[in-house]
Amino acid sequence: AQSVAQPEDQVNVAEGNPLTVKCTYSVSGNPYLFWYVQYPNRGLQFLLKYITGDNLVKGSYGFEAEFNKSQTSFHLKKPSALVSDSALYFCAVRDTTSGTYKYIFGTGTRLKVLA
Amino acid sequence: DGGITQSPKYLFRKEGQNVTLSCEQNLNHDAMYWYRQDPGQGLRLIYYSQIVNDFQKGDIAEGYSVSREKKESFPLTVTSAQKNPTAFYLCASSIRPSGSSYNEQFFGPGTRLTVL
């Protein structure tokens, strides 16, 4: 079965430091990977996606993600964290099995950036 | 201003009542989705629709029903058969998926349903 795992429930980082939010996946075929951010009591906002090509994907608000096929990972990164980056982050993968074009989401990682 | 709207933002239901959550989009997207979000469980798919007049059950469809009579609208009914309906409900849409499609989803602001 296709799946996405976010191994950390919460990540704490000091403002100005680099941040990493981890995501690993298991899919058959080519992975289509996404990152979303959710602020309290709001819907999810799209940050970036990996389809093919360059393993380093740049997205909104200074975020980027590194696709690593051998490690089946798609970690979200930012060189310098802001307090306003504090939110819930979701990794997702397009489910391409059996013609069902669904999206599978991880359980989310809460990022806290400390001033 | 394009996007997805959900109403109401907060909804209270008595046990045994059916309630309907509204989801409307003006993005001209073919595909629409309903998710349920509970703390620590991420997003779980309830129903999805890839085209008008067609929809499929997701992973947790029991106790829910949907309709897709118009491209713009995908209402979700939470029936009395849903034993634990208190949750945050999110609607999303995307360009119609295809074999090589890789389009992201656009999400509405959500409806928080509480059963009294």
Image (tube, helix red, strand yellow):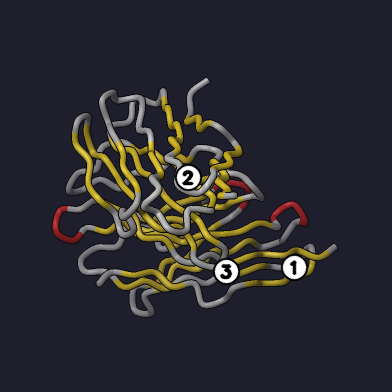
Residue B112 image point, x, y percent: 57, 45
Residue B82 image point, x, y percent: 40, 54
Residue B58 image point, x, y percent: 29, 54
Give neighbour class at mark 1: few <14, some 14-19, many 20+ (Cα, 10 Å). Answer: few
Q: Residue A52: in sight, yes or no? A: no
Between B81 and B28, the one lying in front of the other is B81
* Residue name at image x 33 percent, y 38 percent: B32
Please state which amino acid type lies under the numbered disc 3: Val
Q: Which mark is residue B90?
A: 2
Q: Is residue B10 left or right of residue B99?
A: right
* Residue name at image x 26 percent, y 37 percent: B96
Please state which amino acid type lies under the numbered disc 1: Asn
Reading the image, the residue beneath label 3 is A21
Reading the image, the residue beneath label 1 is A17
* Residue name at image x 24 percent, y 63 percent: A30
Residue A2 image point, x, y percent: 28, 69
Front disc: 1 or 2: 2
- Asked if the residues shown at circle 2 and circle 3 are in contact, with their CB atoms under 8 angstroms apart, the answer is no
* Residue name at image x 38 percent, y 33 percent: B75
Mark pair 1, 2: CA separation? 32 Å
